Image (spheres, grey):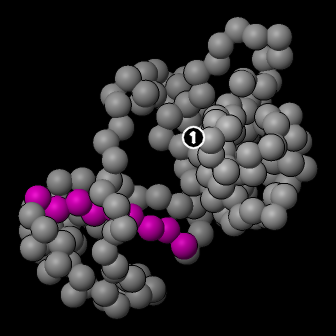
Amino acid sequence: MLAGLFGICGVVVDCRLSGDPTSGFRFAFIEFQHQEDAAIALHLDGIIIGLHPLKVAPSRNAIAPIKHSFLPQSEDEMERSLRTVYCTNIEHMVTAAELKDFFERHFGSVSHVRLLGHNNHATQIAFIEFVEVSGAIIALSSSGIYMRGLAIRVVPSKTPIRTTFNDNPHLDH
């Protein structure tokens, strides 16, 4: 539906919808074949869809392509990716165990945490897989929650966590 609406402005190359599907706050990235078409699409700002006005603004960056091998390769991986969120702006000293505990206290049981960071960066990113999809939905609706003074951005993950063998099956480092 959204790609069709924006298709009146030009050829839509990619349309990615994000955010909690149960809330009124969702967002999308629409990529056009030509930059001029994107400029035309800005005129759709304020159009009413359902009961809500559509906010249209230029993106600050391009839609990053996803490596095909990272995408879910089976029904099991597809189901796991629905229970997984991607988090950014995590304080650099937070451990995987602390992050798991924080997310379990606020949103529900967590099955896996993959925390990625580097000493040269002030923040880390993480993939968090919940036991139930409801935990992921609650976490998505709480994007901006503070941990150690930083607002954590929580968005849907497009990929599942692929676990590796280690001493603790619940924490992937």
The front one of 42 and 52 is 42
Asked if 30 appears above or below 173 in the picture, the reply is below
- Amino acid on which the number 1 mark rests in the picture: Leu
Q: Where is residue 23 drawn, in percent x and y?
A: 59, 69
The front one of 122 and 16 is 122
x 55%, y 74%: residue: 24
From the viewer's perspective, tell me whether residue 48 is left or right of residue 80.
left
Q: Is residue 31 magenta?
A: yes
x 78%, y 17%: residue: 169
Chief secondary structure of the magenta span? strand
Asked if 168 appears above or below 40 in the picture, the reply is above
Q: Quadrant of the C terminus?
A: top right
The residue that mark 1 highlights is 82
Q: Where is residue 11 drawn, in percent x and y?
A: 10, 61
Asked if 14 appears above or below 144 in the picture, the reply is above
Which range of residues does the magenta coloring cover?
25-33
From the viewer's perspective, tell me whether residue 162 is left or right of residue 94.
left
Q: Quadrant of the N terminus?
A: bottom left
